[in-house]
Amino acid sequence: MSPIEPDPALVDAVRGARRVVVFSGAGMSAESGVPTFRDALSGLWERFDPAELATPQAWERDRELVWAWYEWRRALVRRVQPNAGHRAVADWALSTELAVVTQNVDDLHERAGSTVAAHLHGSLFAPRCSACGTPAHVDVHPDLAPVERLAPPLCAECRAPVRPGVVWFGEDLPPAAWSVAQDAVERCDLMVVVGTSGVVYPAAELPLRAVASGATVVEINPEPTDLTSAVTHSWRATAARALPALVASCRPEG
Ligand SMILES: NC(=O)c1ccc[n+]([C@@H]2O[C@H](COP(=O)([O-])OP(=O)(O)OC[C@H]3O[C@@H](n4cnc5c(N)ncnc54)[C@H](O)[C@@H]3O)[C@@H](O)[C@H]2O)c1
Ligand SMILES: [Zn+2]
């Protein structure tokens, strides 16, 4: 693959950034082999609409179906690796104040070495009791071969079913994560928005707030998005190709 270079105006805008927020969405993990929502539903799941599996209503209607879908996603994430984009973000934090704010429910930022400041939409790896909220330890189903139904385990404290530790459509964001994210965005002078379609609110407000507070906001996405017209620079490239180049250009000698 040929080297990729950010355009000079972008380099000028990002060089010398002191407080950075990396705001990531599903496209961040696409090159690791984690499907985005748009292409998540292949094979067994193609009859389903993610907006219908990732809701409290779906859980009430059919827990075994919802639990099986999340177990399949968890197993899939376990089998893939962070990509060069995740690694570039982790490297960057060694030399700059940097907060990772992610909408992703995978753990690829962490496995690349980043500390994640906020998982706005929770985590595949933090299941909890649907009634009392007690965190549950659930081993990852070792078998990627998806099954369409799987009974959720029961809470060790109260015997209610354990639910995925993710935020479903219609649920509130975890208040602590949301508040950490807002603080980081208010303080940053550069926000890099990568692999998000910018349609899921309130998360998608964050780039708009960064723009409003005068930060430089750079979008990395192979496709135009709902945020494109609002950001300072939009770079049509993928996370794994663009982030290493961007981080290299931000180094003082870069
Ligand atoms: N990996 C995950 O954790 C994961 C996967 C699927 C969905 N989700 C959930 O889906 C919700 C949907 O919002 P979203 O905006 O994160 O995802 P989305 O699926 O709505 O949008 C993904 C975006 O990534 C872009 N993209 C695709 N490949 C890319 C690449 N290689 N590099 C950079 N960008 C690329 C697409 O053009 C698109 O704009 C989120 O709340 C998230 O929690 C998470
Ligand atoms: Zn319980």
Image (cartoon, helix red, strand yellow):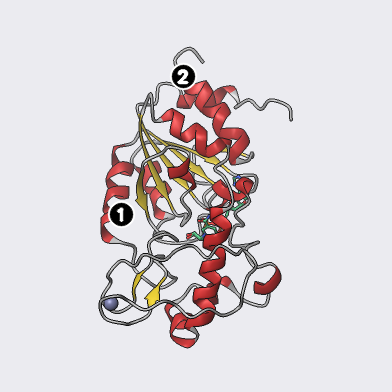
Whole-Å distance between the Cαs marked 1 and 2?
29 Å
Pointer 1: what residue? 177
> Measured from the top left, where is residue 194 in percent x and y?
52, 44
- Pick the front one: 33 or 23: 33
Task: Give the label on residue 251, or none.
Answer: 2
Q: Residue at x 56, y 29 (%)?
A: 244
Task: Give the label on residue 50, or none.
Answer: none
Q: Residue at x 51, y 68 (%)?
A: 70
Q: Amino acid at mark 2?
A: Arg
> Measured from the top left, where is residue 184 in percent x and y?
31, 42
Circle count? 2
Horizontal relation, residue 137 to residue 14: left or right: left
> Measured from the top left, where is residue 64 in percent x and y?
51, 81
Ligand 2 found in image quarter: bottom left
Q: Residue at x 65, y 73 (%)?
A: 45
Q: Residue at x 36, y 79 (%)?
A: 154
Farthest residue to the bottom: give it: 61
Query: For the residue labelled by badge 1, is the local secondary structure a helix, a strand or a loop?
Result: helix
Does residue 103 appear in the picture of this structure? yes
The reply to whether the residue tagged 1 has its Cβ within 8 angstroms of ligand 1 is no
Quadrant housing residue 156: bottom left
